[in-house]
Amino acid sequence: MGRYVVRRLLQFIPTVLGTLFLLHYLTSMAIQFGGNPVRSLFGDRTPPEEQLRQMTEQFGLGDPCLQQKGNPCFGLFWERMQDIFLRFDFGQSLAPRRDVTDVLADALPYTIKLTIIAFIVEAVLGLAAGVLAGLRNGKFSDYVVRIVTVLMISVPIFVSAVLVQKFVGVKFGNWLRQDLDAPEWLGRGLFGAAYKAEFPWLSLILPGIVLGMLTLASTARLTRGSLLENLRADYVRTAKAKGLTTNRVIGVHTLRNSLIPVVTTLGLSIGGYMAGAVVTEGVFRVPGVGFTILKAIATGEPMVLIGLTTVLVLVYLVLNLFVDLLYAVLDPRIRYE
Amino acid sequence: MSEPLSTMSVDNPAAPAAPVGPGEPSKDQSASLWSDARRELLRNPIFVISSVYILIMMSFAFVPKLWTRVDPQDCQLNYGSGEPMFTPGHWLGTSQRGCDYWSHTVYGANPSLQIALYATVGIVAIGLPLGVLAGFYGGWVDALISRLIDIVFALPFLLGALVILGMLRKYSIWTITLVLVVLGWTTVARIMRGSVIAAKNLDYVQAAKALGAKNSRLMFRHILPNAIAPVFVIATIALGGFVAAEATLTFLGVGLQEPAVSWGLMISRHDDFIETWPHLTLIPVTVLVGTVLSFILIGDALRDALDPKLR
């Protein structure tokens, strides 16, 4: 166990550096091939050369290597790593002149709330559906769960976000608000079409459910598969043979074992939420990290874009690490690898 | 059944080349994995229906003239807010800009499916050789390739694509494909590596080695045909994933831009009119979801058919 943890931690450092370098290399290439992103801040106008140079410098994009196509910009990467890990500096945004860390601090609470809601939805519904389908293998409810999950997997998240927003938030919400005179919290909060500051949790429930649906289906399918596999295992037959009650066989022996791989997907799905949050936050206008990323793309704020993505990638990597360590704690077979 | 039967042989190009398996005596009695799989697939109604759907979508994409004679760019702006469904001449109505919606639906398949096809070919072209090398040689080659896979895999797929395209600001079929390939090849490499490791210690490979077969012969003639099945499954599902990814990126504004015609653009252009003109959103949503769903179902059916343990 101890050796596994140490090995995993040692592996973590090069992976973080490698991933951040890859992100840096790809974005640098995008700048090298796409042209100076600062120019697009001016729209159609041609900026005076001096002003353009000055702004490019402020963005930290003045390095000449960003004009040489294919140059990996090692120097710039080294500087950025020092900024990030030693000074906790992710660059500056320009339109309102702010540190990216401040922009992040403003946006993060919304995304965390959204993620918590999505995670609860995914864990509760996904596990329940998976266990139900696994225990009723081949029966009606199993087929329902299997068909619904395949359908859910094939609907891209932007489609489900748009449909839920328009049909539940706008149509159903309008009916509640106008025809039924529903209370504020119900009509405008829970079933509102967009995020509202007066209802910081309620108005996040709808986007949270949409986000949770992104991974709910795969969790349910994995739970079902893992449960089925374990129900066929010898130790379950032994448990039944020695006369344990069904509740104990399933609840204690089978479920605990079959949930080990599910824990991994649940952990990793939080990583999936990061991209999904861009879509849900964009559609429901939640002022979180994803929405800020979209805004940065629209207005052309390169440092906000790179800075926020770097933070999200770091969070994702740390989560992966935790999931791996948790897996080692839960599954003793991992330790002696 | 005669119609799907005739189409299937086109759809399964791997099948005729299959009896290359080791120690095959003749093609009559002991059927190969692939011919067994083909027989099972043709009996699977879900597979047949999904394949027919995909073939129709492919014909939308690559021979649109078969389905409509109207040019999607031939729009009548004086229609104003658009014509409803079943107007003479426009049986699906027109878009907000007065363009024939049926012709948009047909031509809109093209960019999605082109990107999906190119990107899938790309991830297989990169992931397959790397996976084979890592699995076959092990040691430092494996360590190197596995670390590379870890690093690329740690960039969340859609988020990475969003950022790179957002910085690049050149949105064409080729840039989108390139970004999807760069971020997406790891799944194929992982699957291939595992599959090669499982196959390389089998007795027949050892036997071939003992007879003095060279590494390249072992890899391509003995191990690859036995290890490649999971890649077909992954590639089929990836096709659906890329169709969805292209539409998502387009919806977020970093994919194709107008005047291109694509399902993603049709959805993002019309979702604000869903109360008055729901069909303008629901039509592209239906064909898009149907395509993704069909690819996933075909992949599932392939997985079941190619797994001898399930028989």
Image (cartoon, coloured by chain):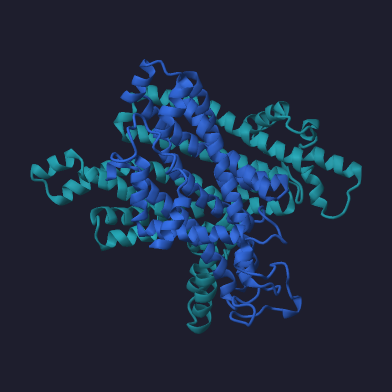
In this view, the residue in front, B34 or A143, is B34
Where is the N terminus of chain B found, in terms of image quarters?
Answer: bottom left
Q: Which chain did the image draw in cyan?
A: A
Left or right: A145 as drawn, with respect to B243: left
Q: Residue at x 52, y 35 (%)?
A: B127
- Quadrant containing the C terminus of chain B is top left
Residue A160 location (% of width, % of height): 51, 62
Name which residue lies at 44% across and 51% down: B9
Indicate the position of residue B307 as horizontal and vertical percent values: 33, 42
- Provide residue B18's location: percent of width, then percent of height: 41, 39
Which corner quadrant of the image does residue B168 belong to?
A: top right
Per the rendering, the colour in which chain B appears is: blue
Q: Is residue A327 above or below residue B172?
A: above
Left/right placement of residue A235 relative to residue B253 reads left
**Residue A220, percent from left and from top:** 36, 52
Q: Is residue A337 visible?
A: no
Asked whether residue A157 is in view, the answer is yes
Indicate left or right for A331 with A251 as reference: right
